[in-house]
Amino acid sequence: MLDATNWDDLRLLLAVARRRSLLGAAQELDLAVSTISRRITKFENTIGSPLLERRADGCSLTDIGKRLSTIAESFAAELNREYELTQASLGQLSGTIRITSGDGFVPIITSVIADFSMTHPDVAIEYSVEHDYRDVARGDVDVAVRVSNHGEPTLIYKKIAEITFGVFTSKEYAATLPKNPKPQDVNYIGMLPPLADEPHMKAARAVGFASSRLRLSSFNTQMAAVNAHLGAAVLPKVEAAGLVDLFPQLTLSALDVFVVSRPQSLKQRHLREFVNRLYSALAQAALPRLGPRR
């Protein structure tokens, strides 16, 4: 029955595996959800076995679906490599790069994308800015910027820098506080999970920053709140230019910044060049900005 399977069938299944839903696959392939569903059903009939477990809240791959999606991933990588070799002989780069990070890294990564796109206009880039963990090992994305090492043995973790933290506020808000303020004197700007569970945030709670009337979901909104004089927040020291360090003697846990990729991805020339540029941009910055744990 596999003789009747074509690349279009595998490509549909691979898109569902990458996006974890029929809707996501439809968006990636620019097709209607009904078309994806109908073609997957036809593929299942050809294989003689279900490939998806359909539920009201989405779908997941069956064991055979996972095996076929792994084959499709490898086949897609081989196709990309062959295409790159052809394009390289013409002096061109092409392909797709899928990258993810927390929102604090957006300025650096978008600058890399802008520079890379100017010199390699045939390369498509998908950049996901989100809190949810994206599985690099499984191929959900090609590159991730993380502030933690999950220890996956099949991935390359390159440490770029270390982020140190302090409790900072605006000069305007600092002027409203006692001369030697205590944590309980400060309107503390907290974070929502998963950011609230970062080591530096836990350390801040341990020394007295335990309650907050304002809790936010991203680094950029946290910075905006501080600049709006709404209180004080735990911020990377490198991002605190012009702000007041309320407790300079305080030591909070630091975070390491990693660029994470798959060895097989770096065999592709367009990915390898992009990752090298990303390494350079992050290393040349004074320090990367804080992002959610990836």
Image (cartoon, rainbow, N blue to C red):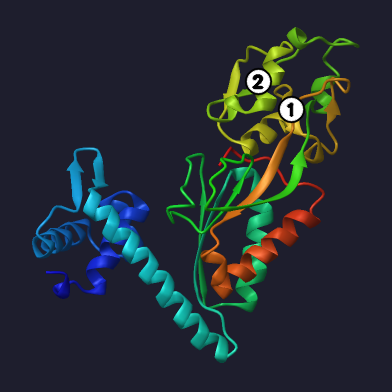
Given residues 213 and 67, the one toward you in this image is 67
Which residue in the protein does label 2 denote? Answer: 202
Q: Quadrant of residue 255?
A: top right
Within 10 Å of disc 1 (Cα), the crowding (few <14, some 14-19, many 20+) is some
Q: Which mark is residue 253?
A: 1
| Residue type highlighted by circle 2 | Lys
Determine whether label 2 and label 1 are within 8 Å by CB: yes
Give SS at disc 1.
loop
Residue 121 at what x, y percent from top left? Answer: 56, 77
Rendered residue at 64%/36% (across/down): 219
Q: Quadrant of residue 48?
A: bottom left
Residue 155 at what x, y percent from top left? Answer: 55, 53
- Of the 4 image quadrants, the one containing the C terminus is top right
Disc 2 versus disc 1: distance between alpha carbons? 9 Å
Which residue occupies the extreme right position in the image? 179
Within 10 Å of disc 2 (Cα), the crowding (few <14, some 14-19, many 20+) is some
| Residue type highlighted by circle 1 | Ser
Tell me if residue 209 comes above or below residue 148 in the rendering: above
